């Protein structure tokens, strides 16, 4: 009897232990540990706080400006969106560099906590001020959370996750970043029917909740870097020639992307005369499509000899989006396809452009020695943002003089130049700097 009881007890222990081990193996397979879990909370909470309002900022501006007719209000909103996007990229450049320095000197824990503070201040201002320029200023504070946090997330993955799990770890982060992009526009599209204040109130709730959860998780997260001062020139010199060519290709690509990124919803609603709710559904469809690709592609990248095909496909699809947004809604309805289906196809193809993002991030994370990773990633992203920050302002002037269609086609052409430069000039030799660092 005692033996039997003892046997049952052992069986239950084995079951619990096996279940725990199975859970741990799944977490390891996905590159999840205590440190990366804290990063996921930051990405998810602050991402939701941004997505329920940002996609409708252009619509809010359109309703806040004056104009004699709808077309003039759309153009005026495009002007403010151009100003907003210009300063977003300019401040992001500083944010990435500052975030890299904070993560390097004070550790990823402090950097992730700091990233949410400007957001809270921005939401308070946006809730009480309604002038278009004040709206732009407040929105700039809110959107600067990501550049402050990116160097810390790269430092965490690069230091806490094995090399053969990094792409999948970045894929999981991309999923967590993409989930708010799926549900945020859906929630925001319904909320804006009540009023933009509801979008902001929901967003404020998300960021406060994320900061509270993050506060407890950060206690369990160990610092990723020793505090060692690193001169700026040394960080710059550690960007390998191949990563420099990748950076130059990305700058061309992002120039084209920023010709359309913050103007796409304004074009769909203000020019193609679709509803706010439909615009929210299209954005959610794009993000849901991207979400489906991350895990299978992340594992393929981890096993691939070279990530170049994945990154190259991403470049091509990035460049194709503004071209598709102009051509498909014009051509397909003439062939009997509804406008809704035509736009859905445009945004599905846009979602597929995330296929190579885990590969690109894994390549960059492995391209710097661990002791410089946070600073170097911040510098890489910062230089990129500085380089293309004028693109949205130029997009507005092109929109004003030539119309949105010509503007988007020019953006697509710039993206194709960046894609061609990438395919012919970038080798994507993985982890060369990290291997040299390990060898020494």
Image: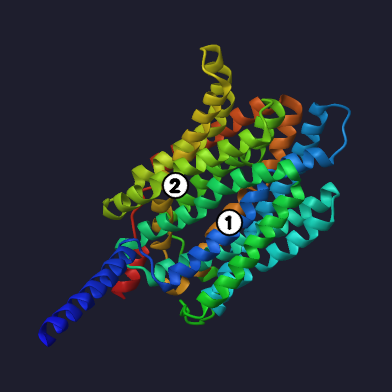
* Left or right of 133, for residue 344: left
At which x and y percent is residue 363?
39, 56
Q: Are marks 1 and 2 in contact (CB under 8 Å)?
A: no
Question: Is label 1 in a helix, a strand or a loop?
Answer: helix
Colouring rule applied to residues: rainbow
Q: What residue occupies the far bottom of the structure in this picture?
A: 2
The answer to whether residue 331 shows anywhere in this view is yes
Tell me the quadrant of the picture where the C terminus can be found: bottom left
Tell me the quadrant of the picture where the N terminus can be found: bottom left
Q: How many numbered tags mark residues here?
A: 2
How packed is label 1: few (under 14 Cα within 10 Å), some, or many (20 or more)?
many
Residues 419 and 238: in front is 419
Q: Is residue 432 above or below residue 395?
A: below
Q: Residue at x 41, y 54 (%)?
A: 171
Quadrant assignment, res 56: top right
Residues 103 and 397: in front is 103
Q: Residue at x 34, y 48 (%)?
A: 297
Residue 291 - label: 2
At which x and y percent is residue 71?
79, 27
At which x and y percent is residue 59?
73, 39
At which x and y percent is residue 221?
47, 77
Residue placed under numbered mark 1 in the picture = 47
* Left or right of 420, for residue 56: right
Residues 367 and 358: in front is 358
The answer to whether residue 416 shows anywhere in this view is no
Question: Is label 2 in a helix, a strand or a loop?
Answer: helix
Residues 343 and 191: in front is 191
The tag earlier along the polypeptide, 1 or 2, is: 1
């Amino acid at each position: 009897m005692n033996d039997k009881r003892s046997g049952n007890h052992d069986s239950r222990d084995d079951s619990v232990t096996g279940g725990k081990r199975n859970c741990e193996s799944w977490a390891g397979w996905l590159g999840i540990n205590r440190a990366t879990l804290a990063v996921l909370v930051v990405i998810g909470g602050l991402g939701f706080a941004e997505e329920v309002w940002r996609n409708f900022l252009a619509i809010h501006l359109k309703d806040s400006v004056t104009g004699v007719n709808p077309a003039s209000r759309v153009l005026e909103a495009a002007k403010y969106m151009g100003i907003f996007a210009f300063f977003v990229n300019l401040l992001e450049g500083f944010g990435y560099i500052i975030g890299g320095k904070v993560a390097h000197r004070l550790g990823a824990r402090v950097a992730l906590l700091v990233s949410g503070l400007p957001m809270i201040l921005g939401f308070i201002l946006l809730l009480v001020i309604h002038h278009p320029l004040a709206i732009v200023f407040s929105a700039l504070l809110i959107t600067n959370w990501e550049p402050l946090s990116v160097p810390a997330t790269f430092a965490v993955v690069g230091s806490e996750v094995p090399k053969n799990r990094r792409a999948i770890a970045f894929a999981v982060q991309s999923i967590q970043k993409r989930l708010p992009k799926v549900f945020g526009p859906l929630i925001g599209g319904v909320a804006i029917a009540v009023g933009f204040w509801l979008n902001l109130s929901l967003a404020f709730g998300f960021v406060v909740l994320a900061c509270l959860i993050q506060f407890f998780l950060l206690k369990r997260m160990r610092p990723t870097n020793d505090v060692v001062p690193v001169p700026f020139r040394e960080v710059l010199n550690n960007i390998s020639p191949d990563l420099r060519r990748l950076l130059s290709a990305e700058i061309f690509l992002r120039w084209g992307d920023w010709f359309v990124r913050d103007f796409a919803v304004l074009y769909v609603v203000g020019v193609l005369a679709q509803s706010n709710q439909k615009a929210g559904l299209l954005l959610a469809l794009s993000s849901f499509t991207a979400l489906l690709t991350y895990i299978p592609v992340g594992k393929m990248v981890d096993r691939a000899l070279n990530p170049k095909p994945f990154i190259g496909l991403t470049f091509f699809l990035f460049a194709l989006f503004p071209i598709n947004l102009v051509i498909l809604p014009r051509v397909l309805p003439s062939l009997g396809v509804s406008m809704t289906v035509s736009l859905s196809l445009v945004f599905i193809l846009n979602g597929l452009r995330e296929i190579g993002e885990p590969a690109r991030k894994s390549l960059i994370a492995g391209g710097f020695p661990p002791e410089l990773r946070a600073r170097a990633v911040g510098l890489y992203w910062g230089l990129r943002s500085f380089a293309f920050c004028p693109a949205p302002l130029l997009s507005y002037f092109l929109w004003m003089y030539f119309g949105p269609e010509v503007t988007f086609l020019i953006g697509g052409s710039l993206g194709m130049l960046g894609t061609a430069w990438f395919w012919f000039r970038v080798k994507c030799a993985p982890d060369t700097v990290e291997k040299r660092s390990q060898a020494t």
